Image: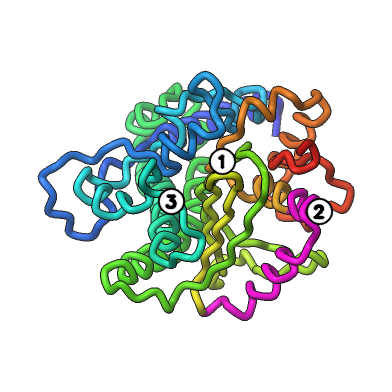
Amino acid sequence: MSAKDEQRAQRVHAKIWGTYRNLALQSCLIPECQSSGKVIKAHSIQEKRVLRSVSNNGHVYMIKSTAQGFAFQLVGVRKATRFTGFCSQHDNELFDKVDLGDERSINPNDPEQAVRLSLRSTACEYWKKLNAQIFFRKLLQLARSGDVPSISEYINLDQVDVSKSLDYVISVAKSRLDGFDFAVKRIGRQFMSLLHQLESGKFHLSKFSTIRLKTSPTVVVSAHFPPEYNLSGKCIVSKMTGVDLPEVTLNIVPNENEVVLMFLWHKRYEQLFRSFFHDLENLKEAKRALILSQMLIMQVENMALSPRLVDMWEDQEKSAVLDLFKRTTNVSIPYLTDWNVDLFGIKSC
């Protein structure tokens, strides 16, 4: 490939991913929703008591992709972690009981709270995958039909670049669509399972692990991901397309003088995950915080960090976090034995 062709491929790639990231599905995820209300911009991490617990002057740090690579960006708490996955009626019905306030705190032993928080985590991830599926399906259809003007308009790219890159666009769109089709089915199944548990009031299909850290809140999370390695460095989860992917949800929330990490998974993965979390719970607190910090950096995007923590870091620590985040965007690795950046501030307590 010539230098000119490489530059064109880079432009096409940037436009595809730039358009995809800005696409936002505007539809309630509840099947056959009959609500007359509009879809709302709701927080996947509660603003009032959770995001604001780690904010400084109304802002938190999130790791974002920029033209220069990944970077810490300040985001206002009113905008951070928002997604358009529910109408107002269903958002209130499903999540009012986990909106923390003066009269409601987190109860680490309450399975209903855990399932509601997990539903919101799963919904956000499901919404992202649906966005991707819609985008790449349309892009593939346009590319296969050779509709250069429509592709040009869809991804805001010069028609000359589009016309000379149709094979590349088809290749990218098809490979991505295959993966997202499978992800939508997999995560959609988990979403419906959690929804049915709430409707029935029976939570026996969900298993839990709760970790409580005696520290001030420095990071909050609402996420859905596969823990890929155990503490010995053995791969415990396969990411092969077509293979059922064991995943957990994680919510990190403040609770009085501690931070609570609530993990949830489906009972069919109990044997796989119970030993992993047992080992994690038995680590000394400082060591456990370093493992958990790596877990968040490697596997979580929907994470808000306190400026009070990040602004204390040396440039070397900031670079280490961003480098590990980038390194594990598409590749999984075992936990590092020499890692020393703690997102929970345990070492400094």
Q: Give the image location of residue 206, x and y in percent.
A: 46, 72
Q: Secondary structure at mark 3?
A: helix
Q: Which residue is mark 1?
A: 303
Where is 299 relative to 264, above or below?
above
Q: CA distance from mark 3 to mark 1?
A: 18 Å
Q: CA distance from mark 1 to mark 2?
A: 21 Å
Give the residues drawn in magenta, as a range. 268-291
Quadrant hosting residue 234:
bottom right
Q: Is residue 9 visible?
A: no
Q: Secondary structure at mark 2?
A: helix
Residue reaching furthest top?
Answer: 57
Q: Which residue is mark 2?
A: 287
Q: How packed is label 1: few (under 14 Cα within 10 Å), some, or many (20 or more)?
A: many
Where is 294 relative to 322, above or below?
below
Q: Is residue 220 visible?
A: yes
Quadrant hosting residue 61:
top right
Quadrant hosting residue 219:
top right
Residue reaching furthest right?
Answer: 338
Task: Please name the residue shown 30% across and 72% down the image.
Answer: 201
Q: How packed is label 3: few (under 14 Cα within 10 Å), some, or many (20 or more)?
A: many
Q: Secondary structure at mark 1?
A: strand
Where is 195 relative to 117, above or below?
below
Determine contact: label 3, label 1, CB under 8 Å: no
Q: Is residue 192 left or right of residue 87?
A: right
Q: Which residue is mark 3?
A: 129
Quadrant where the C terminus lies? top right
Q: Give the image location of residue 172, x and y in percent.
A: 53, 46
Task: Please name the residue shown 40% across and 45% down the image.
Answer: 100
Q: Is residue 65 left or right of residue 159?
A: right
Return the residue nearer the eye: 113 or 327.
113
Q: Amino acid at mark 3?
A: Lys
